[in-house]
Image (cartoon, rainbow, N blue to C red):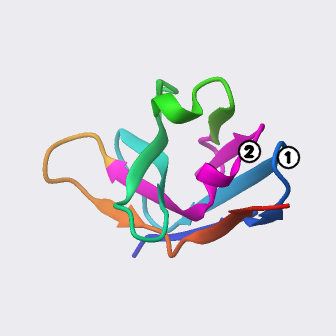
Amino acid sequence: QVQLVESGGGLVQPGGSLRLSCAASGRIFGSNAMGWYRQAPGKERELVATITSGTRTDYADSVKGRFIISRDNAKNTVYLQMTSLNSEDTAVYYCRLRATWAYGYDYWGQGTQVNVSS
């Protein structure tokens, strides 16, 4: 069984920075993508950024130029460096690991809260 453990959330002032981490444990095989999604109160879960095992990245327009996603394949860990945070970034951030082929595995973390407030 694969488990995803997120860390790094918390309270930060507008304009500040945070770094999220997500470590995957268990048997992971094949080409995959790791990513971050977020869900704000009263809103649907949305994509923030993803990165494949080949390090191809994709970002939501709202975070381009402010967030950077990276991964350490040897550690099965994905990171999200967030800068210039604003109140609209407040949400629960979820880590996801999924196979890149149809009907492959798909795992989610439990989420970590990010609050941007003065």
Say what secondary structure mark 2 lies in.
Answer: loop
Tell me, yes or no, whether the two marked residues, 1 and 2, touch with CB atoms within 8 Å.
yes
Q: Look at 82% across and 46% down and name the residue there.
A: 17
Q: Position of residue 72 (x, y in %)?
A: 65, 41
Q: Look at 65% across and 23% down and name the residue there.
A: 65
Q: Which residue is mark 2?
A: 85
Quadrant containing the N terminus is bottom left
Can residue 59 be seen? no
Q: Position of residue 56 (x, y in %)?
A: 47, 24
Q: Residues within 10 Å of mark 1 (few under 14, many from 20)?
A: some
Q: CA distance from mark 1 to mark 2?
A: 6 Å
Residue 37 sits above or below residue 48 on the image: below
As drawn, which residue projects farthest toward the front? 118
Looking at the picture, tell me which residue is in the foreground, 48 or 32.
48
Looking at the picture, tell me which residue is in the foreground, 107 or 27.
107
Asked whether residue 88 is drawn in magenta, I would say: yes
Q: Quadrant of residue 6?
A: bottom right
Q: Which residue is mark 1?
A: 16
Q: Which residues are magenta?
A: 72-98
Asked whether residue 27 is drawn in magenta, I would say: no
